[in-house]
Image: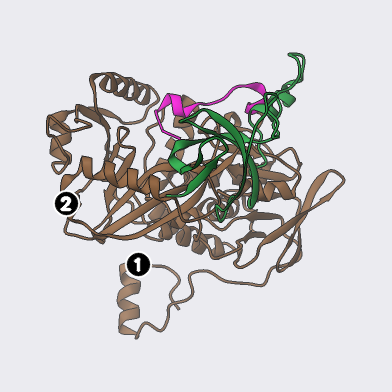
Chain colours: A brown, B green
Amino acid sequence: MTRRYSALSLIKEGLAGQKGWQPAWRSPEPKKIYDAVVIGGGGHGLATAYYLARSHGVTNVAVLEKGWIGGGNTGRNTTVVRSNYYYPESVAIYGLAHRLYEGLSKELNYNVMLSKRGMVFLCHSTGEMEIGARTVNAMQINGVDAEMFSVDDVRRVAPVLNFAPDARFPVFGGVWQGRAGTARHDAVAWGYARAASALGVDIIQNCEVTDFIVEGGRCRGVQTSRGTIRTDRIGMAVAGHSSVLSAKAGLRLPINSYALQACVSEPIKPILDTVVLSPGTGVYVSQSDKGEIVIGGALDRVPSYGQRGNLPTLEGVISGLLEMFPAFGQLKLMRQWAGIVDVVPDSSPIIGESPLPGLFLNCGWGTGGFKAIPAGGTLLAHLLATGKHHDISRPFDLDRFVTGRLLDEAAGSGIAH
Amino acid sequence: MQLFHCPFCGARDETEFHFGGEAGNLRPDGADAPADRWANYLYMRDNPKGAVREVWVHMNCGEFFVMERDSVSHQVLSSTSLDGAGHAQ
């Protein structure tokens, strides 16, 4: 029976007719009582359960997922991992995530296919070059790698870009983060699920939370489509539906839900071996290991829970893509989809105990939750295990919307939403 | 392209409209309102899944109005002008 994945186990299984493989995680019936329950079987929820078990020794944990694990935004993003943020608080949280990603395949014994291919954040004018230099300086002061790229540097890493002098968004240079890259999004969910399950965590799919049990002013458990589950510590990591779930607990959050679209082209031979982001066109592009061009862009403009996306935004994204890469005009789009993301006024996540004691929040990641999965899991696990903030999560508490101490990364790092 | 209905101009492309927030979110009266009341007004949202009532503006003509629609199917149910006090007529 093969439990550990390795080249040796592949050879052994190959010789033994592939009969010894086990399901990567158990699918038990839910118990009546747990020490902690995590709602949401996406990357953040599964990572939370894993770190609860591994770092805090809390193994009597359930992850409740209304559909299948990794079927929400974890399976719908453009798989980019980076940490080019502005404020020290943001650098601390995304930097933690980035460092954990770098050791994740080994830690989980599951190949998340992290490819540190580098990412260039383009600058389209002399003004943007100055803002780019400010970003690079801020990142370096905060201990994160970043370089200012000239137009020749950009041409070296992404020669297929449109460098024509009459381009609508001419390339002046860019901000380069060499450690940025992509990872296999499904593998992140599956790897955390497998490692958490091996430590004793129950992963329960097709189990929707329908209500919270509140007794004596505290959250004491949940009603689910598969029965009542009692626990004194509940974490929720249900991006896109955070408002819907928190409303069941009588809470309001500073979140509007929007669709974020992405699409992929047919697979082609290698043409782009870095990630390119253009703030001018609002487009993100990379090429997957299978050869598809993976395209992401701006949020839809209409608040929505429909996981489809609206045509005008897709049209804008594709127009921007063709302006940046005229050669891609020959490609055919193969798939288009959307995920529903939590949009918060200051474009920073919300982590901390909710106003209902016993219920802890991990939400509000906006369009950037995938890159933060290991940090979101580490910090929510810390909160659930200790009841207190980790130093890194403290600035991201919900109370910042009352105190006014916002972390406005839309202004800081120029993210569009 | 979806068509939204401006009470002044009629059916127009969705790209001409801008979302202005949830309807009925009234500004606290007076500067001595407590901080959590201001936080509620400025930041906290119901953000419902399904039937929603929202303030929108048609950017071409400047008409502010309340649109009732479904946040999953995107079906528009009604568009109603706002009166001077910010209430739907």
| Residue farthest to the right, as pictured | A216
Q: Can you identify the residue that label 2 sits on?
A: A271
Q: Residue at image x 59%, y 44%?
A: A362
The image shows residue A245, relative to residue B31, as above or below, that is below
Q: Position of residue A167 (x, y in %)?
A: 17, 33
Q: Identify the mark nearer the N-term, 1 or 2.
A: 1
Give the residue type at disc 1: Ser
Asked whether residue A415 is drawn in magenta, I would say yes
Q: Foreground mark, 1 or 2? A: 2
Tell me the quarter of the image containing the C terminus of chain B: top right
Snapshot quadrant of residue A3? bottom left
Snapshot quadrant of residue A216? top right
The image shows residue A302, relative to residue A85, as above or below, that is below
Q: Residue at image x 48%, y 31%?
A: B59
Q: Can you identify the residue that label 1 sits on?
A: A6
User: Could you say whether the residue bearing mark 2 is in a helix, strand or loop?
Assistant: loop
Q: Position of residue A204 (x, y in %)?
A: 62, 66
Q: Residue at image x 45%, y 60%?
A: A191
Q: CA distance from mark 1 to mark 2?
A: 31 Å
Q: Residue at image x 44%, y 31%?
A: A91
Say few, some or many: other residues with alpha carbon within 10 Å of mark 2 (under 14 / 14 to 19 / 20 or more): few
The chain letter under disc 2 is A
Asked whether residue A184 is drawn in magenta, I would say no
User: Could you say whether the residue bearing mark 1 is in a helix, strand or loop?
Assistant: loop
The chain letter under disc 1 is A
Q: What stretch of residues is rendered in magenta?
A: A400-417
